[in-house]
Image (tube, rainbow, N blue to C red):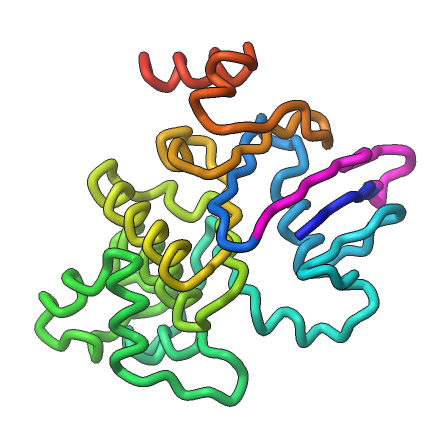
Amino acid sequence: MSFVSALTSPLPNIPVLSSLSLSIQPGQFCALVGPSGAGKSTVLTLLERFYTPISGSISINGFNIAHHSTSFRDDIAYVPQENVLFHGSIRFNLTLGARPGYNPTDDEIEEACKIANIHDTIISLPRGYNTECGANGSQLSGGQRQRLSIARALVRKPKLLLLDESTSALDAESERALELGLERAVKGHGVTVIAIAHRLRTIARADIIFLVEAGMVVDKGRHEELVQRSESYRVNALHQMLG
């Protein structure tokens, strides 16, 4: 996947992204980090073609997405920071993530939940997968809602999984278990993951990290490389360690 783009805000003369260039290989776990307002979430919305860049192009598997119907989104799953769950059972909410016209099997649903580290929690509930979520998931904790939303995205068996601060409510143990599950998905199923995270421990094992500042990629590399090379990344890492 390649991404060369510029995007301007609806407000006059305010660039959101400027000459931002990314290149991501299939099956990589990638991360976007940087200060709030740097344009990280905008990258994800451009990948889904919710916005059209004023210049440049976005290509997936060599095809410019601007020249294709929106059916390419069938291969993409997006998990926002604010999770949306509907009144109904856990199973019902999970099936909503499937590709259009496909009814996932119980085994496929459970496999997605195992990757998202929510299966054991679900089967410990008195009604298991038939447990009611409540209005907007009110019967579940914040961390459970986030893991369930990630599992719902994985039910789709996406080729590209987009995570926008999707683990912010998880404790360190749950986050680590989810990280291992996503690594299995990347290696075993060829899923490409692009994650936005403020907590660097979330993406420390990423194959490549893009440091985004003021709408541009100012550096890229693995966690260890950026700690050595980038002052802003190093300061952020030290601040989180001490905080």
Figure check: 179 above or below 118: above
In-image side of 99 versus 104 (left or right):
right
Q: Nearer the viewer, residue 2 or 54?
A: 2
Where does the image place residue 125, in percent across and percent down from the top left? 11, 68
Residue 98 in magenta stretch: no
Q: Residue at x 32, y 45 (%)?
A: 179
Above or below, 63 against 91 in this view is: above
Say which of 189 and 19 sits in front: 189
Q: Is residue 153 left or right of residue 181?
A: right
Residue 126: which quarter of the image? bottom left
- Range drawn in magenta: 8-25
**Residue 21, percent from left and from top:** 73, 38
> Which residue appears at 33% of the width and 64% of the height?
137
- x then y, percent, for residue 112: 32, 67
At horizontal 53% and vertical 48% (from top left) the residue drawn is 194
Q: How many marks?
A: 0
Foreground residue among 152 and 157: 157
Left or right: where 125 falls relative to 213: left
Judge from the rendering whether residue 233 lies leftward or rightward of residue 87; answer left or right. Answer: right
Q: State yes or no: residue 21 in magenta.
A: yes
Q: Identify the residue at image location x=63%, y=50%.
A: 44
In the picture, which quadrant includes the C terminus? Answer: top left
Residue 60: give x, y in percent of width and height.
68, 59
